[in-house]
Image (cartoon, rainbow, N blue to C red):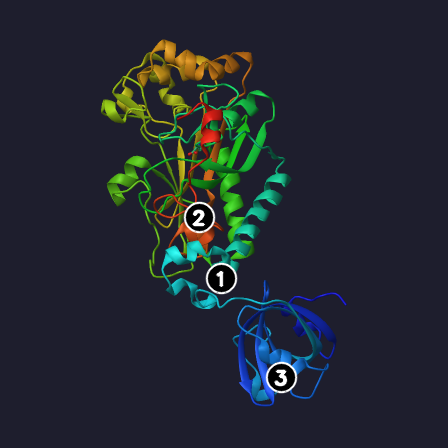
Amino acid sequence: MSRVWVTETVERLDEVVEVKGWVMSRRDHGKLIFIDLRDRSGLLQVVFKNGAGAEGLFDKANQLRSEYVVSITGKIQKRGERQINPDMPTGTVELIADDMEILAEAETPVFEIEKAHEVGEDLRMQYRYLDLRSERMRNNLEKRHQIISIIHNYLDAEKFWEIETPYLTKGTPEGAREYVIPARLNPGSYFVLPQSPQQFKQLLMVGGVERYYQIARCFRDEDMRGDRQAEFTQMDMEMSFVEREDVMAVNEAMLIKIVETLYPEKRIQQVPFPRISYKEAMEKYGSDRPDLREDKDDPNLLAFCWVIDFPFFEKTNKEEHHGAEGEWTFTHNPFSAAIPEHREWLQNKQNIGDILTTQYDIVLNGYEIGGGSIRNHKAEDLRKVLEIIGHKPENIERDFGHMLKAFTFGTPPHGGIAWGLDRLVMLLQNEPSIRDVMAFPKTGDARDLMMGAPADVSAKQLKELGLS
Ligand code: ASP
């Protein structure tokens, strides 16, 4: 007999079926024992009757404890009128057990599964596999999967190719500290983990790919201010022969598709999404990620907007300055192009503080959920940006020579964007933290309490790496 998911049992009335899962709770009523059986799809009430079913079945049912793993066969029956539970998708039926196998016993769980969110988060992290059994976490993971699935289908239909870019690579300036990996085969050299696939996706455009995307892991070794993670996921894309509005249009349509398909109860406040200049956002809302919701208490209201026309450069002090000497730094992305009207200023290094970038940020309910830009596809323009932010010629060659060179071989105009996927899922799921929509997040101080990482490595490993 093949196993059925418990939520499918409502369509199997009067049939004998086999279900498998975890015992969520057991209630003894003398001659009857009830359990709630949980599998990934939901819950089902199972009834054991003293004297019915296989030999010894009732005794076995008596041994059941929370989180035992069982396989049960029996008939699906309609519940009596008074037993119907309207809060449960399978609340109109129950399974009358005929036979059962205990597949695994279980220690008493360290917290009650459905009350996981009431215990300290460190405990949930340490026993994440138990936490994941809760309905709330299962639902978050399922929705995350479905969102990613829509992204794949949508972009496939739009002729994007999903391409994986390296995780072992070279540093790229995007404003954050990088994770460094010693390279054993090249002693004294190091890989870094990418803050984003930025350079590779642009090089894919040089490579003629035209439309790329990736559900990409990104790494930023930052002090964990607020709700950040050392590794997080981006929906990253790049397109050739496009202008700002082209990239925005694809992304806007894909976001709408996700909401309409998976969240029919939600309402998008304004379509097309409003476009607001940085200047207007700051003047009117005092923020470059304004929360435009008409009703901030409505959990089903989604107010998307695009923020555009950011200043390209801002003044900074030397210490914070990404290793370069000058006093200008980029506000978003050094690979961005200036808006067409300001390209001449960039080329002449003129009116630097007034140059606007093609950067566009996508904002939802006061959170930045993504950002991107049209890039400098001409080597001399990229070189000008790097000079303005104070890189010395020899450093430009060392750190960006490969990009500048690539751009001399016939590079199409191109642009792209990346979404912070964790944050988008968090907002759509109305969760307070991105940790609630990641299967195995790290704590606020970047530790994995379940695996015990980071940890020591052996003296032998260090020696091999030439480290002490
Ligand atoms: N690489 C940028 C980021 O990670 C996104 C982009 O400009 O496409 O923020």
399 or 453, nearer to the observer: 453
**Callout 2: helix, strand or loop?**
loop
Query: Can you tell which of label 2 and label 1 is closer to the viewer?
Result: 2
The quadrant where residue 55 appears: bottom right
Image quadrant where one finds the C terminus = top left
208 or 5, nearer to the observer: 5
Q: Which of marks 2 and 3 is nearer the N terminus?
A: 3
Image quadrant where one finds the N terminus = bottom right
Q: Is disc 2 surrounded by few (<14), some (14 to 19) or many (20+) residues within 10 Å?
A: many
x then y, percent, for residue 382: 41, 17
Q: Which mark identifies residue 265? A: 1
Outermost residue toward the right in this view: 1
Q: Which of marks 3 and 1 is nearer the N terminus?
A: 3
Q: Earlier in the sequence, mark 2 or mark 1?
A: 1
Q: How far apart are marks 3 and 1 (CA)?
A: 30 Å
Q: Which mark identifies residue 79? A: 3
Q: In this view, does 262 lie to the left or right of 70?
A: left
Residue contact between numbered discs 2 and 3, judged by CB atoms under 8 Å? no
Asked whether the viewer can see residue 48, the reply is yes
Please give the name of the residue rendered at 65% of the width and 88% of the height, measured from the top-left corner.
50
Pointer 2: what residue? 441
In the image, what residue type sits under mark 1? Glu
Q: How far apart are marks 2 and 1 (CA)?
A: 28 Å
In the image, what residue type sits under mark 3? Arg
Instruction: State yes or no: Cβ of the residue under disc 2 lies below 8 Å from any atom of ligand 1.
Output: no
112 or 236, nearer to the observer: 112
**Callout 1: helix, strand or loop?**
loop
